């Protein structure tokens, strides 16, 4: 069913009791051309583009819990593409361009809002670094511009108004095409569109083993039985090294908690995303009025999805320093997702030493923004067996060749 | 908040410490090691969803390094022992 104003009115007349399911709930078949492990945004996007661009529709997406119940539902919904390195800028800009037309393409309201993202500079060194990044972005055709302190205060009047704040505001950099999107909607939109093209989305189906015959992967053991697959694509966050160990492979990944907080809803007060890399916090206001606050990742390897208290304390202290007006806000929820961080803070996309086994992981603290682009280039990689040109630099072999994509711009708090 | 027993200062809050990642990593002989060994040394770390042996430093205290055996799922600290020592019997 196509969603439209007409369908909304018609269903409204029926008290919304007759909306059809958005996607089927199929039993797993014994074999598929492609099995995708992980039903988050990236996995569902991969399935959608496999079906749409490559005509591969005999595809299953296996999800151990519910769709988008992992990091897709735990991030802080920021979308941007202002990365320093050429390879990253191209990949994330590819993704941002897809975002711009995606609600229409999927016929699903992703609530994509290009409200801009401002990074603040509190020191001269940060100003220099920003100007360097700006120059790199310009060369890669990514929109970004510097803001003076006066422009900053005009846009965000609630920034610390004291004449001599502890962290001086020297300037900022804005990407106006950056913004936020509704994270659940991205998973649901891709799921519905992939399902419509014949992809089987199988929830509550945990992969417990990857079966190999010699150097080839031939299928997956799951809690709902064995499923054979001509190709297996692992697209998981937080557990990439655990899943790949099932195939006898190691990954250069370490897993850490990344936390976020949400405040009680308040009237509109902040119409953009503001981040400070120096004092480690970023904040935006959701359409419901809640402030969504993110910070740095925790300091040690963990699979406990809760995060440590000192990080919350630092994050809230930084928030109050930047925005004293928020000091009496109450926070409703705090949570953590486990993020897989690679040595150069860039994702790992491509083939593995095991034939027919592909991996897309290591998005670290900032994978949400890349969801459509990641699925798009990964589907190309799976279908053709050769990496998409934009994904080629992100192969696992870069740690042996030494051609790292050392992405400092992803390192701080700008997820 | 973890309560970490520094071998020199006793129990202190987690916020006084910094984690230095996996412990007991041996640097290979650069003259003898081929690429695979170096890649392993530089980039590959154990990332277990289980007991993990790691280095910590008492950054806001005595500033000394030591080893911690900690479960990465429950955060339970099974043992704390000094640099150069092996993990206690029964912890591995």
Image: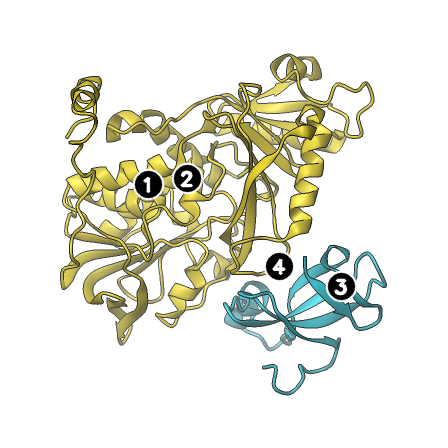
Does dot 1 land on a helix, a strand or a loop? helix
Discs 2, 4: same chain: yes
Q: Residues within 10 Å of mark 3 (few under 14, many from 20)?
A: some
Q: Is residue A113 left or right of residue A207?
A: right
Write down the residue under mark 1: A187
Q: CA distance from mark 2 to mark 3?
A: 35 Å
- Sequence-first tag of 2 and 4: 4
Chain rendered cyan: B
Quarter assignment of residue A377: top left
Quarter assignment of residue A184: top left
Q: Chain A in the picture: what colour?
A: yellow
Write down the residue under mark 3: B57
Give the number of the mark in front: 2 or 4.
4
Q: Residue at x 66, y 40 (%)?
A: A315
- Sequence-first tag of 1 and 2: 1
Q: Foreground residue, A379 or A388?
A: A379
Q: Are marks 3 and 4 in contact (CB under 8 Å)?
A: no
Q: Residues within 10 Å of mark 1 (few under 14, many from 20)?
A: many
- Sequence-first tag of 1 and 4: 1
Give the number of the mark in front: 2 or 3.
3
Q: Chain of mark 3?
A: B
């Amino acid at each position: 069913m196509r969603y439209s104003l007409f369908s909304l009115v018609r269903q409204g007349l029926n008290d919304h009791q007759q909306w059809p399911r958005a996607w089927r709930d199929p039993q797993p078949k014994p074999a598929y051309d492609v099995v995708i492990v992980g039903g988050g945004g990236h996995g569902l996007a991969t399935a959608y583009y496999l079906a749409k661009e490559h005509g591969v529709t005999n595809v299953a997406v296996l999800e151990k819990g519910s769709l988008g119940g992992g990091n897709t539902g735990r991030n802080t919904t920021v979308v941007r593409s202002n990365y320093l390195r050429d390879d990253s800028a191209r990949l994330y800009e590819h993704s941002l361009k897809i975002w711009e037309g995606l609600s229409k393409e999927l016929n699903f309201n992703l609530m994509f809002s290009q409200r801009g993202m401002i990074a603040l500079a509190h020191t001269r060194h940060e100003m220099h670094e920003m100007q360097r990044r700006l120059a790199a972005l310009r060369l890669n055709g990514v929109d970004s511009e510097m803001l003076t302190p006066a422009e900053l205060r005009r846009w965000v009047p609630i920034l610390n108004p004291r004449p001599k704040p502890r962290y001086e505001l020297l300037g900022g950099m804005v990407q106006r095409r950056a913004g936020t999107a509704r994270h659940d909607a991205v998973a649901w939109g891709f799921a519905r569109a992939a399902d419509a093209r014949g992809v089987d989305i199988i929830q509550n189906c945990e992969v417990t083993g990857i079966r190999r015959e010699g150097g080839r992967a031939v299928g997956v053991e799951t809690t709902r039985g064995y499923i054979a697959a001509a190709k297996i694509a692992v697209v998981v966050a937080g557990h990439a090294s655990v899943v790949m160990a099932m195939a006898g492979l190691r990954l250069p990944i370490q897993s850490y908690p990344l936390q976020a907080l949400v405040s009680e809803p308040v009237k509109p007060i902040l119409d953009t995303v503001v981040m400070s890399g120096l004092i480690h916090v970023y904040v935006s206001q959701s359409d419901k009025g809640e402030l969504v606050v993110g910070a740095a990742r925790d300091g040690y390897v963990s699979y406990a999805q809760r995060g440590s208290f000192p990080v919350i304390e630092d994050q809230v202290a930084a928030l109050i320093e930047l925005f004293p007006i928020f000091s009496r806000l109450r926070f409703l929820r705090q949570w953590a997702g486990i993020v897989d961080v690679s040595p150069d803070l860039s994702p790992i996309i491509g083939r593995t030493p095991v034939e027919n086994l592909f991996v897309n992981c290591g998005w670290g603290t900032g994978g949400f923004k890349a969801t459509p682009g990641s699925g798009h280039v990964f589907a190309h990689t799976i279908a053709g067996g050769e990496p998409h040109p934009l994904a080629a630099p992100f192969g696992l072999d870069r740690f042996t060749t030494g051609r790292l994509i050392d992405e400092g711009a992803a390192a701080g708090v700008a997820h | 908040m973890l309560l970490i027993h520094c071998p020199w200062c006793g129990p202190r809050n987690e916020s006084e410490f910094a984690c230095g990642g996996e412990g007991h990593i041996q640097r290979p002989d650069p003259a003898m090691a081929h690429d695979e060994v170096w890649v392993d040394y530089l980039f590959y770390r154990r990332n277990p969803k289980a007991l993990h042996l790691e280095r910590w430093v008492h950054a806001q205290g005595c500033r000394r390094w030591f080893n911690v055996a900690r479960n990465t799922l429950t955060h339970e600290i099974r043992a704390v022992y000094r640099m150069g020592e092996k993990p206690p019997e029964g912890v591995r």
